[in-house]
Image (cartoon, helix red, strand yellow):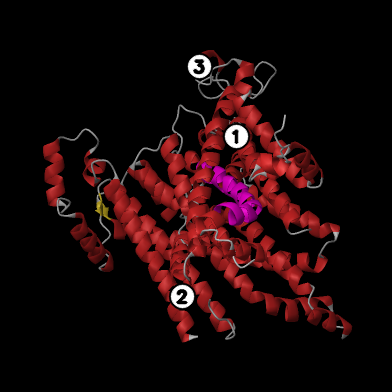
Amino acid sequence: MFAMILRRLLVSVTSLVLLVTIVFFMIHATPGGPAYSILGMHASPAAVAALNKQMGLSQPLGEQYVIWWWHLLQGRLGYSYIQHTPVTRLLRIYTGRTLLLDLSALGLAALIALVVGLVQGYLAERPLGKVIGVFQIVFYALPVFFVGILLIYILSIRLNLFPPGGIGHHGLDSRLRHLALPVFTLTLPIAAGLSRYFGHQARQEYRLDYVRTARARGLSDLRIALHHVLRNAVRPFVTMVGMMIPAVFVGDVLTESVFNYPGLGWLLWRSALDQDYPTVSAITLFIGVLTILGNLLADLINSILDVRVRYE
Amino acid sequence: MNEPRSTPERRWGLFPALHAGRFASALRSAPLTAAGLGLFLFLVAFSWLGPLLIHTSPYAIRPALLFRPPSWSHPLGTDDLGRSFLARMMYGGQPSLGVAMLGTVIAVVLGLLYGMSSGLSPSWLDKVLMRTLDAILALPTLVLMIFFAALVRLDALSLILLLGFVSWPGLARIARNEVLAYKQRDYVLAARQFGAGTGYLARTHLLRSMLPIVLVNATFTVADLVLTLAGLSFLGLGIQPPNPSWGGLLGNGSNLAIIGAWWLILFPGLAIVLAILAMNMMGQGILNRLEGR
């Protein structure tokens, strides 16, 4: 198990190195380099040279790469020229809101997927199971930004039931009302995707002999589902949840933008529109790191759940 | 007339399924694929043939015709500048579908090259290449695309290249697994015995065996790229106005939602959903047949 964790860590570290390297080289591959992004495309060569010297951008690329790493390891993520504040300060403000939204949605989606998947496995090829299958495909194909804007149009603008965006400030009730639509929007495709995978898994589980044995022993359907099928299918399920994490962050960026929910995704969007490249690259790195850690966590939980797991 | 009559296999080379007779019978036995293909062809015709029929510019601003709801004279209504929304939807389909399809072509080529090289490499190198792939797959693609968009103004060509560049890893994994599944088969070993080189084997035998599964995943990739591009354009970071794209139109419509112009939201949103559904149905239909269900 120790060797497995070590190998798994190696993959995560490789992801990290690749991510940092891609971000570094993309920044320096832009025409004219970062100085033009800050000063604008029509900056005078003298101004660009001065800024390059001030920021250490005139040094050889290899040296800059090493310095970039050194700064990252110290937690120095750069300075936003648009917001005039260190990026780490921005991350401290916005990260909590994003984690609240994403973890609520992922938790809710996992719960829905477990129930729907078990029902689907139990129903197998019966008509109702197929109907659920169609709903999963349709909901998975619905883009979060389309669903989000429809919900705003119908529930906020027409019916005035929910606030159309923001996070609310006055007490728990207001906060929850602001959170409801974004969480629902983000949950929908994740639940559809997860329950589709898990439904497939549960169907295969239901075909195995131990289920037939349990039925022969006269156990109730509920008991078979919870004590037998769920127990055996929970490990692949944790893996699936881990694999959904990149999709959660993609959905998060779009959901936060639609609902003007000021989290990391929203900040990434606004900063990209402003071409605020230090902020954008820091958030890209940060979301990448969160994704990698999430994946790692899913695999570690898996290995704790069952010692037979061997990472291959 | 002493030329040998060409058999379907010979004429169609790598793509025997494209032979007309076989194609029709294949579609009959896979209704899901047929429905998806029909839907997809409808969207393609809407985007590329539609503009030839309506003779309306998607850029012509008409101050007298702002925010007209759908009617017989304006089938999909008009937008905030009085432009014909039908024309904008038609022209908007071209980048929305075209960029996604061309990006997929790049992803397939890169994925096949990487995956087949990995599968045919010695096992230690294969392991290294696959670990690298795991590492790339852990990155959220839309976030990377937003990062690229913040650094450079993206036009259609750079969007195609970058979308292809971020979406090949899934296809590479599949190509590599297929190579491993087929490279020990008798017919491949026999060909090797007769002196066939690795390149020849890859081109003729392996590529041909993995074609169906690669096709399935290419259709799923098109669906993913339609979604990614639409999301990017929705955020104002993909196809730039005044050029229409379905994602961009939806983004513009959502800013105008407060006015109650529902048609500016519903039609582009539906077009994106239908395109994604069409590709997923096609892929799933072929997959069901491959799995013999």
Q: Are marks 1 and 2 on the same chain?
A: no
Q: Is residue A234 left or right of residue A169?
A: right
Point out residue A145 in the picture as x, y percentages from the top left corner: 55, 45
Q: Residue at x 68, y 42 (%)?
A: B10
The disc at residue A8 is: 2
Q: Mark 1 and mark 3: span between their CA atoms?
A: 19 Å
Q: Residue at x 76, y 68 (%)?
A: A203
The residue that mark 3 highlights is: B60
Of residues B257 and B73, the one nearer the viewer is B73
Q: Mark 1 and mark 2: span between their CA atoms?
A: 43 Å
Point out residue A96 in the picture as x, y percentages from the top left corner: 43, 63
Report the mark closest to the observer, 1 or 2.
2
Extreme-front residue of the structure: B2
Point out residue B164 in the picture as x, y percentages from the top left corner: 48, 46
Magenta stretch holds residue B212: yes
Q: Chain of mark 1?
A: B
Q: Are marks 1 and 3 on the same chain?
A: yes
The residue that mark 1 highlights is: B268
Magenta stretch holds residue A88: no
Q: Is residue B205 visible?
A: yes
Report the mark closest to the observer, 3 or 2.
2
Report the magenta residues as a range.
B203-230
Q: Chain of mark 2?
A: A
The disc at residue B293 is: none
